[in-house]
Amino acid sequence: MTRPPLHALQGFIAAARSGNLSRAADALHLTVSALSHQIRGLEERVGQRLFVRGARGVTLTEDGRALFERVAPHLDAIELALRPLRVSRDDALTLTLMPSFASSWLMPRLPRFLAAHPQLQISLQSNVGVVDFGRETSLDAGVRFGPGQWPGLDAVHLFDDWVIPTASPALIERLGRPTLQTLGDFPLLGAPGGRWSGWFEHFGGTLPSRFVASFDDSENLHRAAAEGLGIALGRMTLARPMIEAGRLVALFDERLKAEFAHYLVFPPRSRNHAGLAAFRDWLLGEARAYVEAEADADQAAKIPGATRPSRQRRPAKR
Protein backbone atom coordinates (compact mmCIF):
# COMPACT_ATOMS: atom_id res chain seq x y z
CA MET A 1 0.00 0.00 0.00
CA THR A 2 1.31 3.42 -0.89
CA ARG A 3 1.69 6.06 1.81
CA PRO A 4 -1.35 8.29 2.43
CA PRO A 5 -0.98 11.86 1.16
CA LEU A 6 -0.10 14.21 4.02
CA HIS A 7 -2.03 17.08 2.45
CA ALA A 8 -5.24 15.02 2.61
CA LEU A 9 -4.63 14.22 6.27
CA GLN A 10 -3.95 17.90 6.98
CA GLY A 11 -7.22 18.82 5.30
CA PHE A 12 -9.05 16.14 7.28
CA ILE A 13 -7.62 17.41 10.61
CA ALA A 14 -8.42 21.05 9.76
CA ALA A 15 -12.02 20.19 8.84
CA ALA A 16 -12.45 18.06 11.97
CA ARG A 17 -11.23 20.85 14.23
CA SER A 18 -13.22 23.65 12.64
CA GLY A 19 -16.36 21.65 11.89
CA ASN A 20 -16.73 23.74 8.78
CA LEU A 21 -15.27 23.10 5.32
CA SER A 22 -15.22 26.79 4.34
CA ARG A 23 -13.21 27.84 7.39
CA ALA A 24 -10.86 24.89 7.03
CA ALA A 25 -10.31 25.63 3.35
CA ASP A 26 -9.55 29.29 4.11
CA ALA A 27 -7.01 28.27 6.75
CA LEU A 28 -5.28 25.97 4.27
CA HIS A 29 -5.52 28.46 1.37
CA LEU A 30 -7.63 26.02 -0.65
CA THR A 31 -11.00 26.19 -2.32
CA VAL A 32 -13.85 24.30 -0.67
CA SER A 33 -14.04 22.11 -3.76
CA ALA A 34 -10.36 21.16 -3.49
CA LEU A 35 -10.68 20.33 0.21
CA SER A 36 -13.81 18.25 -0.40
CA HIS A 37 -11.95 16.35 -3.11
CA GLN A 38 -9.10 15.59 -0.69
CA ILE A 39 -11.47 14.31 1.97
CA ARG A 40 -13.38 12.12 -0.51
CA GLY A 41 -10.08 10.64 -1.67
CA LEU A 42 -9.10 9.91 1.94
CA GLU A 43 -12.49 8.28 2.62
CA GLU A 44 -12.07 6.08 -0.46
CA ARG A 45 -8.58 5.10 0.68
CA VAL A 46 -9.60 4.04 4.20
CA GLY A 47 -12.92 2.62 3.05
CA GLN A 48 -14.87 4.49 5.69
CA ARG A 49 -17.07 7.55 5.83
CA LEU A 50 -15.28 10.15 7.96
CA PHE A 51 -17.76 13.02 8.11
CA VAL A 52 -21.49 13.58 8.28
CA ARG A 53 -22.31 16.73 6.34
CA GLY A 54 -25.09 18.96 7.64
CA ALA A 55 -26.54 22.41 7.06
CA ARG A 56 -24.28 23.96 9.72
CA GLY A 57 -21.06 22.14 8.89
CA VAL A 58 -19.50 18.73 9.27
CA THR A 59 -19.18 16.34 12.21
CA LEU A 60 -16.97 13.30 12.58
CA THR A 61 -18.37 9.83 12.28
CA GLU A 62 -17.24 7.18 14.78
CA ASP A 63 -14.58 6.03 12.29
CA GLY A 64 -13.60 9.65 11.64
CA ARG A 65 -13.16 10.28 15.36
CA ALA A 66 -10.95 7.21 15.70
CA LEU A 67 -8.77 8.32 12.77
CA PHE A 68 -8.55 11.86 14.15
CA GLU A 69 -7.37 10.64 17.56
CA ARG A 70 -4.67 8.47 15.96
CA VAL A 71 -3.38 10.98 13.40
CA ALA A 72 -3.76 14.47 14.93
CA PRO A 73 -1.08 14.10 17.65
CA HIS A 74 1.52 13.04 15.06
CA LEU A 75 0.77 15.93 12.70
CA ASP A 76 0.90 18.33 15.65
CA ALA A 77 4.31 16.92 16.62
CA ILE A 78 5.61 17.46 13.08
CA GLU A 79 4.30 21.04 13.08
CA LEU A 80 5.93 21.73 16.45
CA ALA A 81 9.26 20.30 15.31
CA LEU A 82 9.33 22.46 12.18
CA ARG A 83 8.40 25.75 13.84
CA PRO A 84 11.88 26.75 15.06
CA LEU A 85 13.32 26.16 11.59
CA ARG A 86 11.00 28.54 9.78
CA VAL A 87 12.51 31.76 8.49
CA SER A 88 10.31 34.80 8.06
CA ARG A 89 10.36 36.66 4.78
CA ASP A 90 12.43 39.82 4.97
CA ASP A 91 9.77 41.74 3.03
CA ALA A 92 6.96 40.78 5.42
CA LEU A 93 6.75 41.86 9.06
CA THR A 94 4.13 40.77 11.61
CA LEU A 95 3.90 42.64 14.91
CA THR A 96 1.86 42.23 18.06
CA LEU A 97 0.77 45.49 19.71
CA MET A 98 -1.39 46.59 22.61
CA PRO A 99 -4.54 48.20 21.12
CA SER A 100 -4.19 51.42 23.12
CA PHE A 101 -0.58 51.96 22.03
CA ALA A 102 -1.39 51.13 18.42
CA SER A 103 -4.28 53.58 18.13
CA SER A 104 -2.86 56.49 20.12
CA TRP A 105 0.86 56.40 19.30
CA LEU A 106 1.84 54.15 16.41
CA MET A 107 -0.96 54.63 13.88
CA PRO A 108 -0.46 58.40 13.42
CA ARG A 109 3.24 57.76 12.69
CA LEU A 110 3.07 54.52 10.71
CA PRO A 111 2.36 56.13 7.29
CA ARG A 112 5.87 57.63 7.39
CA PHE A 113 7.42 54.19 7.78
CA LEU A 114 5.31 52.65 5.01
CA ALA A 115 6.16 55.53 2.67
CA ALA A 116 9.87 54.98 3.30
CA HIS A 117 9.61 51.18 2.88
CA PRO A 118 6.94 50.50 0.24
CA GLN A 119 8.37 47.04 -0.44
CA LEU A 120 7.64 45.87 3.12
CA GLN A 121 4.33 44.21 3.86
CA ILE A 122 3.38 44.85 7.49
CA SER A 123 0.72 43.09 9.54
CA LEU A 124 -0.43 44.32 12.96
CA GLN A 125 -2.14 42.13 15.55
CA SER A 126 -3.76 43.60 18.66
CA ASN A 127 -3.13 41.63 21.82
CA VAL A 128 -3.00 42.62 25.48
CA GLY A 129 -1.94 39.24 26.84
CA VAL A 130 1.34 37.41 27.06
CA VAL A 131 2.54 36.18 23.66
CA ASP A 132 4.49 32.94 23.29
CA PHE A 133 6.81 33.60 20.34
CA GLY A 134 7.84 29.93 20.45
CA ARG A 135 4.33 28.89 19.49
CA GLU A 136 3.23 31.99 17.58
CA THR A 137 5.88 31.62 14.90
CA SER A 138 4.06 33.95 12.52
CA LEU A 139 4.91 36.85 14.86
CA ASP A 140 8.26 38.55 14.28
CA ALA A 141 8.22 41.11 17.10
CA GLY A 142 6.00 43.15 19.38
CA VAL A 143 5.76 46.40 21.30
CA ARG A 144 4.96 46.07 24.98
CA PHE A 145 4.60 48.25 28.06
CA GLY A 146 6.43 46.44 30.82
CA PRO A 147 9.50 45.99 33.03
CA GLY A 148 11.94 45.46 30.15
CA GLN A 149 12.87 41.88 30.90
CA TRP A 150 11.11 38.97 29.24
CA PRO A 151 12.79 35.52 29.40
CA GLY A 152 14.14 34.40 26.05
CA LEU A 153 13.43 37.70 24.27
CA ASP A 154 15.49 40.71 23.21
CA ALA A 155 14.08 43.99 24.52
CA VAL A 156 14.96 47.41 23.08
CA HIS A 157 13.94 50.39 25.23
CA LEU A 158 11.88 52.95 23.32
CA PHE A 159 10.83 55.53 25.91
CA ASP A 160 9.51 55.93 29.44
CA ASP A 161 5.98 57.00 30.21
CA TRP A 162 4.55 59.45 32.73
CA VAL A 163 1.19 59.69 34.47
CA ILE A 164 -0.74 62.86 35.25
CA PRO A 165 -4.31 63.60 36.35
CA THR A 166 -6.46 64.55 33.37
CA ALA A 167 -10.06 65.72 33.10
CA SER A 168 -12.49 66.91 30.47
CA PRO A 169 -13.08 70.67 30.00
CA ALA A 170 -16.74 70.03 30.90
CA LEU A 171 -15.82 68.53 34.28
CA ILE A 172 -13.52 71.48 35.04
CA GLU A 173 -16.28 73.89 34.08
CA ARG A 174 -18.72 72.06 36.35
CA LEU A 175 -16.55 71.44 39.41
CA GLY A 176 -13.60 73.78 39.07
CA ARG A 177 -9.96 72.84 38.92
CA PRO A 178 -8.37 70.96 41.82
CA THR A 179 -5.12 71.71 43.56
CA LEU A 180 -2.72 68.98 44.61
CA GLN A 181 -4.21 69.12 48.09
CA THR A 182 -7.89 69.08 47.05
CA LEU A 183 -7.59 66.48 44.29
CA GLY A 184 -8.93 63.72 46.55
CA ASP A 185 -12.21 65.66 46.94
CA PHE A 186 -12.95 65.34 43.22
CA PRO A 187 -14.47 62.30 41.43
CA LEU A 188 -11.56 60.04 40.53
CA LEU A 189 -11.45 57.14 38.10
CA GLY A 190 -9.44 54.10 39.08
CA ALA A 191 -8.91 52.11 42.24
CA PRO A 192 -7.48 52.89 45.69
CA GLY A 193 -4.27 50.98 44.99
CA GLY A 194 -1.79 51.21 42.17
CA ARG A 195 -0.88 54.47 40.49
CA TRP A 196 -3.21 56.71 42.48
CA SER A 197 -1.60 55.55 45.73
CA GLY A 198 1.81 56.39 44.30
CA TRP A 199 0.58 59.81 43.15
CA PHE A 200 -0.81 60.87 46.56
CA GLU A 201 2.20 59.46 48.37
CA HIS A 202 4.52 61.49 46.14
CA PHE A 203 2.60 64.77 45.82
CA GLY A 204 0.48 64.86 48.97
CA GLY A 205 -3.24 65.19 49.45
CA THR A 206 -5.67 62.57 50.74
CA LEU A 207 -6.37 59.38 48.82
CA PRO A 208 -10.16 58.89 48.74
CA SER A 209 -11.66 55.66 50.00
CA ARG A 210 -14.15 55.52 47.13
CA PHE A 211 -13.58 55.94 43.39
CA VAL A 212 -16.26 56.69 40.83
CA ALA A 213 -15.38 53.81 38.50
CA SER A 214 -12.47 51.54 37.60
CA PHE A 215 -11.42 50.08 34.25
CA ASP A 216 -9.23 47.17 33.20
CA ASP A 217 -8.35 48.87 29.91
CA SER A 218 -6.35 52.11 29.64
CA GLU A 219 -8.11 53.24 26.49
CA ASN A 220 -11.54 53.03 28.13
CA LEU A 221 -10.19 54.86 31.17
CA HIS A 222 -9.11 57.83 29.05
CA ARG A 223 -12.37 57.84 27.11
CA ALA A 224 -14.37 57.88 30.35
CA ALA A 225 -12.37 60.90 31.51
CA ALA A 226 -12.99 62.64 28.19
CA GLU A 227 -16.73 62.08 28.65
CA GLY A 228 -16.61 63.88 32.00
CA LEU A 229 -17.13 60.83 34.22
CA GLY A 230 -14.21 61.76 36.46
CA ILE A 231 -10.49 62.49 36.67
CA ALA A 232 -8.16 59.85 35.29
CA LEU A 233 -4.52 59.34 36.16
CA GLY A 234 -3.65 59.10 32.49
CA ARG A 235 -0.51 57.88 30.77
CA MET A 236 0.83 60.67 28.60
CA THR A 237 1.35 58.32 25.65
CA LEU A 238 -2.41 57.78 25.52
CA ALA A 239 -3.59 61.10 26.88
CA ARG A 240 -1.49 63.46 24.72
CA PRO A 241 -3.58 63.07 21.51
CA MET A 242 -6.77 63.74 23.50
CA ILE A 243 -5.17 66.75 25.20
CA GLU A 244 -4.10 68.17 21.83
CA ALA A 245 -7.62 67.59 20.50
CA GLY A 246 -9.09 69.51 23.43
CA ARG A 247 -10.94 66.50 24.86
CA LEU A 248 -8.75 66.28 27.98
CA VAL A 249 -6.83 68.81 30.07
CA ALA A 250 -3.66 68.02 32.01
CA LEU A 251 -4.46 69.37 35.47
CA PHE A 252 -0.93 69.91 36.78
CA ASP A 253 2.63 70.52 35.64
CA GLU A 254 3.69 67.78 38.05
CA ARG A 255 3.78 64.24 36.75
CA LEU A 256 4.85 60.85 38.04
CA LYS A 257 7.09 58.43 36.17
CA ALA A 258 5.25 55.20 35.31
CA GLU A 259 6.57 52.00 36.79
CA PHE A 260 6.99 50.48 33.32
CA ALA A 261 8.30 51.67 29.94
CA HIS A 262 7.71 50.92 26.25
CA TYR A 263 9.89 48.28 24.56
CA LEU A 264 10.31 46.61 21.20
CA VAL A 265 10.60 42.88 21.92
CA PHE A 266 11.48 40.00 19.62
CA PRO A 267 12.75 36.40 19.77
CA PRO A 268 16.32 35.47 18.78
CA ARG A 269 15.10 34.05 15.46
CA SER A 270 14.15 37.61 14.39
CA ARG A 271 17.56 39.18 15.02
CA ASN A 272 18.57 38.94 11.37
CA HIS A 273 15.18 39.87 9.93
CA ALA A 274 15.89 42.72 7.51
CA GLY A 275 12.36 44.10 7.70
CA LEU A 276 12.47 44.17 11.48
CA ALA A 277 15.87 45.89 11.42
CA ALA A 278 14.40 48.67 9.27
CA PHE A 279 11.36 48.97 11.54
CA ARG A 280 13.54 49.02 14.67
CA ASP A 281 15.73 51.85 13.34
CA TRP A 282 12.68 53.86 12.31
CA LEU A 283 10.89 53.19 15.61
CA LEU A 284 13.90 54.33 17.65
CA GLY A 285 14.03 57.54 15.62
CA GLU A 286 10.32 58.17 16.21
CA ALA A 287 10.78 57.44 19.92
CA ARG A 288 13.60 60.00 20.18
CA ALA A 289 11.49 62.61 18.36
CA TYR A 290 8.56 61.88 20.68
CA VAL A 291 10.70 62.32 23.81
CA GLU A 292 12.04 65.63 22.49
CA ALA A 293 8.52 66.84 21.60
CA GLU A 294 7.30 65.93 25.09
CA ALA A 295 10.14 67.90 26.64
CA ASP A 296 9.25 70.92 24.49
CA ALA A 297 5.58 70.61 25.47
CA ASP A 298 6.54 70.46 29.15
CA GLN A 299 8.59 73.61 28.78
CA ALA A 300 5.74 75.43 27.03
CA ALA A 301 3.29 74.35 29.73
CA LYS A 302 5.43 76.06 32.38
CA ILE A 303 4.91 79.50 30.80
CA PRO A 304 2.73 81.43 33.31
CA GLY A 305 -0.92 81.49 32.26
CA ALA A 306 -0.38 79.19 29.28
CA THR A 307 -2.45 76.28 30.52
CA ARG A 308 -4.01 77.18 33.84
CA PRO A 309 -7.35 78.98 34.26
CA SER A 310 -7.47 81.47 37.10
CA ARG A 311 -10.61 80.06 38.69
CA GLN A 312 -10.35 77.30 41.29
CA ARG A 313 -13.08 76.12 43.59
CA ARG A 314 -13.80 73.01 45.60
CA PRO A 315 -16.42 70.66 44.24
CA ALA A 316 -19.86 70.42 45.76
CA LYS A 317 -20.41 67.75 48.41
CA ARG A 318 -21.06 64.34 46.93
Image (cartoon, rainbow, N blue to C red):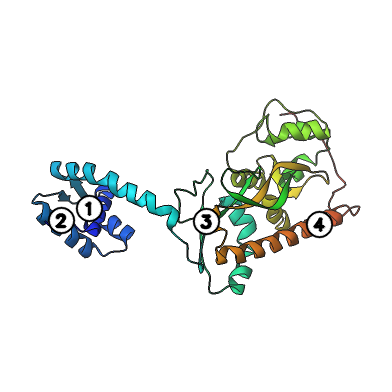
Numbered tag placed on residue 42 in the rendering: 2
Contact (Cβ within 8 Å) of mark 1 with mark 2: yes
Q: Name the residue under label 3.
A: 269
Please tell me whether residue 115 is drawn above or below residue 26 in the rendered image: below
Judged by depth in the image, the label closer to the viewer, 2 or 3, is 3
The spot of residue 259 in percent (x, y) is 71, 40
Q: Which of 154 and 43 is in front in this view?
A: 154
Secondary element type, mark 3 = helix
Q: Where is residue 303 in the image (x, y as percent from the top left)?
A: 90, 54
Cα–Cα gap, marks 2 and 3: 37 Å
Q: CA gap, disc 1 to disc 4?
A: 59 Å
Q: Which amino acid does label 4 sit on?
A: Ala
Amino acid identity at mark 3: Arg
In the picture, the quarter occupied by the C terminus is top right
Q: Earlier in the sequence, mark 1 or mark 4?
A: 1
Q: Distance between the residues labelled 4 and 3?
A: 39 Å
Q: Which residue is drawn at 59% across and 44% down?
A: 150
Q: Position of residue 193 (x, y in %)?
A: 68, 30
How far is disc 1 from disc 3 in space, using C-alphas? 31 Å
Q: Residue furthest front?
A: 1
Disc 4, SS? helix
